[in-house]
Amino acid sequence: MPRHTHTFGRLLSASQLPYFQLRPPHDYGVLTTTGHKTGKHRSRCVRVVRRGDKAFLVAIGGKRNHWAKNILANPHVRLRLRAGRFLGVASEIPAEERNEARESYAADVHWFERLEWRVWRKGGFTPEQSRELHRHWFDTGLPFVVKLTDARAPQAHANNS
């Protein structure tokens, strides 16, 4: 199956989901949205970079991406990150925060990026090439910021339980 297709992305995410639910790699996690048509909870593995009470993620396919459509219809999400489980409200990144978010999204390179590189690119891997790939995704995709709260907190979103 050719890479860079919607079907390939869905299959890749589905194959990684059980592992990511247990312990996601650094700067990756499981995003759970509410389906914009069905109202069912939908989980996908995504690159998500946390900075304090914010998390940055990018819908690589832009508004065609199913989880992006779900966020745009209902911004209340759940995130399973390496640091725990969080509830949050997602929104498109405001223009004044884009540069900071872009650099945060591309800053760190860990072991999992080597596997990611093999899926998305050919040739040798370097940390700078990985950063450039993430900047490219940010620039050509639809970036979101999620304002996080602890999933165990009492103010949990009623429609996200």
Image (cartoon, rainbow, N blue to C red):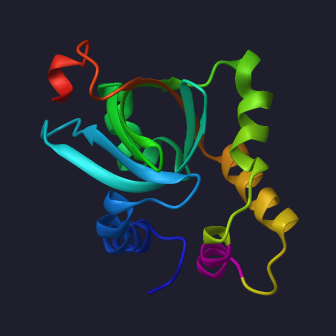
Q: Is residue 1 left or right of residue 51?
A: left
- Is 158 contained in the magenta span? no
Judge whether 14 appears above or below 79 on screen: below
Q: Is residue 117 left or right of residue 47?
A: right
**Quadrant in the picture for residue 149:** top left
Give the magenta-colored segment's residue range.
114-121
Q: Position of residue 43 (x, y in %)?
A: 28, 51
Quadrant (top left, top right, bottom left, bottom right) of the N terminus: bottom left
Residue ID at (82%, 85%): 124
Q: Quadrant of the C terminus?
A: top left
Q: Position of residue 16 (x, y in %)?
A: 38, 70
The residue at the point 70 percent across, 78 percent down is 121
Spot occupied by residue 155 in the image (x, y as percentages of width and height): 26, 12
Q: Is residue 71 above or below residue 124?
A: above
Overall secondary structure of the magenta section: helix
Query: Would residue 88 appear left or right of 33 to someone viewing this image?
Result: right
Residue at left offset 73%, top offset 39% = 104
Residue occupying the point 20% across, 28% down: 160
Pinpoint residue 90: horizontal percent, then vertical percent.
Answer: 44, 26
| Residue 151 vs residue 144, the one in the foreground | 151
Which one is nearer the viewer's eye here, 121 or 61? Answer: 121
Which residue extends farthest top?
Answer: 155
Return the residue nearer the eye: 111 or 61.
Answer: 111
